Image (spheres, rainbow, N blue to C red):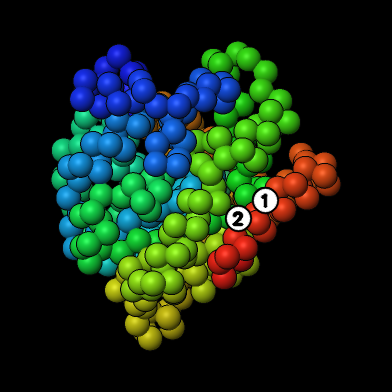
Amino acid sequence: ATTKIEEVDPKYKELILTLPKEDQWLAIELRKYGGFWYPERHFSGVLAMQEVFKSQPSDVIIASFMKSGTTWLKALAFAVLHREKYNLSSHPLLKLNPHDCVPIIEHHYATRDEHYLESVPSPRVLGTHVSYSMLPDSIKTSTSKIVYICRDPKDVLVSLWHMVTKFEWFNKPFPFAKAFELFCEGRMPYGPVWDHVLEYYTKSIRSPEKILILKYEEMLKDPSDGVVKMANFIGCPFSEDEMKIGSVEKIVELCSFNKLKDLDVNKNGSGAGNVPNNYYFRKAVVGDWQNFMTPEMANTLDEITKEKFSDSTFTY
Ligand code: A3P
């Protein structure tokens, strides 16, 4: 789901071509706007989304920084919100990748098929990687809910580097040390990661009814607790009867890494932008950074994280 700059609506193209550019992430060219680096091929979609997108009061928006657990949260939110509609044995998540159940808003604007979003039955679950400050007013001011997931930046970087280097057609080496350097400077798709988290976190403190922050590491430790919290937050709490018959655990199982990863659609299929679905499923552990970073690198990233959140109560 991408658009070449030549194909972009002229009113956005003119602006995009004036923005600072970063072209070291292999073929993912970035443009900086409002303090964040956006993939150039999606940025017209971000601008159009901001200008045109109309949120419905019942929307649930899954917001995240890339590689923070988006695929998992999309699956969970979709399964929770539509649990009365679908039987677990013939569930859409058994046939479709979570990104095909929960579309990314800006990608549909970038490819100019935003009408698709209107065809999604309400209540909709929609995804975005856009920073809070760049969200359309219609999301900010409607009664729609935002669920945001974040993850230790060290593991985000490792996951992102693996994803980027999987695109074989780039045919260029991309050493981890280079990705690390760019990441530390905040030059990463949708980055800097810290500012992304801070914007959503700060807003969630002021408006806890609007934004729920979930942490990947806590979700891995106790996924049922995260699912119950999310269900309460989006206004469809599990009843006592549902709790008794293990509805929460059944959803956790349906959306678990091992279950989703081994489905035919996720092993062999591909989705938006022809990205093979198996790229979204790698290891799903906490602390894989230890296999790719020197202690010095880890320390540098931790120091940046500490500094970035020094005025905030947020901790990973
Ligand atoms: P790793 O690369 O560390 O394994 P995103 O969905 O935001 O792109 O994030 C991808 C990360 O989430 C990958 O991390 C991936 O393995 C992990 N992931 C994907 N599906 C998951 C699931 N059902 N449960 C837990 N983690 C999952």
Q: Does residue 220 lie above or below 26 as drawn?
A: below
Q: 10 Å neighbourhood of mark 2: few (<14), some, or many (≥20)?
A: few
* Residue located beneath label 1 in the image: 304
**Apparent side of residue 57 relative to residue 174 in the rendered image (left or right):** left
Q: Quadrant of the N terminus?
A: top left
127 or 11, which is in the foreground?
A: 11
Query: Where residue 295 sits: x, y (%)?
Result: 83, 46
**Apparent side of residue 195 relative to residue 113 in the rendered image (left or right):** right
Q: What's under tag 2, amino acid-wise?
A: Lys
Q: Quadrant of the C terminus?
A: bottom right
The answer to whether residue 256 shows anywhere in this view is no
Answer whether labels 1 and 2 touch (C-beta < 8 Å): yes
Label 1 lies in ligand 1 vicinity (Cβ under 8 Å): no
> Which image quadrant for residue 99?
top left
267 or 211, which is in the foreground?
A: 211
* Residue located beneath label 2 in the image: 308
> Which image quadrant for residue 315?
bottom right
